Image (cartoon, grey):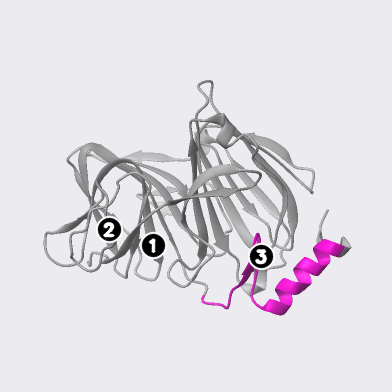
Amino acid sequence: MSIRPIKRIVEAKPTIEGAGVRLRRAFGFGSTEEFDPFLLFDDFRNDNPEDYLAGFPWHPHRGIETITYVLTGTVTHGDSLGNRGTLGAGDLQWMTAGSGILHQEMPKGDPKGRMHGFQLWANLPSSLKMTNPRYQDISAKDIPEVTDDDGTIVRVVCGDFWGKKGPVEGVAADPRYLDVWVPPGRRKTLPVETTRHAFAYVFEGSGSFRAASGPRGIATEQVSESAVGNMVVEQTGNRSLVLFDRGDEVTVQAGDQGIRFLLVSGKPIQEPVAWYGPIVMNTQKELRQAYAELQDGTFIKHR
């Protein structure tokens, strides 16, 4: 078994999206090779309703899948296919935009005004760019949860893990999406296939992810800049993304308050990416065609 080296640790940066939603972006709208098949990851966590209630009004998508995972508050959604619904705490929506869809997502806080969720974009291979749009709305009660002997809790959102299978099916990149809680002071090793690109996103507590050589780790508790190999580089535990290199397992040491993070991995698609805004194709010609269709009203292929 080989522990995955840590390429670097990134602190999610403040940004504004939609109609004025203030959120944190860990990666997106840059080089896609290291995260392939994933394109973007946003943490929309806020306690001030004025910073998120404007939401994400009607906008298009083509050529990707958007994954929305809600922890606190609700997100109401609607689309050009006539779908309507509301995601609550613990719920998930895996939307395959495929050939094209118009939709909106409007976050609403809990009774105390708190809102927290994540959105991940996954690329589609060229063979599925123009597939039929599809929704997989998953209720919190349908996401399997497994507790290990040491108290580690894993929600299996997508993929197979510890004998459990997540409810999301038929996704091109065969991703694994886990919500992991490791109790205070515990050390945990989690398998990740060598053929996958993988990252962890810490959103509660603190701890350290161990590097490939020696007992030293990468602390994720205070502020710092970067990490390479087995260097010890401190970083904020909250809103820190750890990008892993190749290997077949990840080892984490939880801090005094435990650590909770998303562990996401997927098989690289390794195709050209032509990307502008919410549309991701393989060539600039395809991208220009998509935006031309938006202008002339032929963007939606399936109703």
- Residue behind mark 3: 63
Q: Which numbered disc, 1 or 2, marks the residue that appears first in the sequence? A: 1
Place of residue 108 in the rendered image (x, y in percent of width and height, measured from the top left) = 60, 31
Place of residue 197 in the rendered image (x, y in percent of width and height, measured from the top left) = 40, 66
Q: CA distance from mark 3 to mark 1?
A: 21 Å
Q: Which mark is residue 198?
A: 1
Q: CA distance from mark 1 to mark 2?
A: 10 Å
Q: Give the farthest residue toward the right.
A: 296
From the viewer's perspective, is the residue at label 2 or at label 3 nearer? Answer: 3
User: Residue 196, can we see it?
Assistant: yes
Position of 117 with respect to 200 (left or right) is right
When the figure is inspected, residue 284 is found, relative to residue 168, above or below; the finding is below
Q: Which numbered disc, 3 or 1, marks the residue that appears first in the sequence? A: 3
Q: CA distance from mark 2 to mark 3?
A: 31 Å
- Residue behind mark 2: 250
For the residues labelled 3 and 1, say whether their Cβ atoms are less than 8 Å apart. no
Q: Which numbered disc, 2 or 3, marks the residue that appears first in the sequence? A: 3
Residue 286 sits inside the magenta stretch: yes
Three-letter amino acid code at the position of disc 3: Gly
Tell me where the magenta segment starts and ends, as one range: 270-295
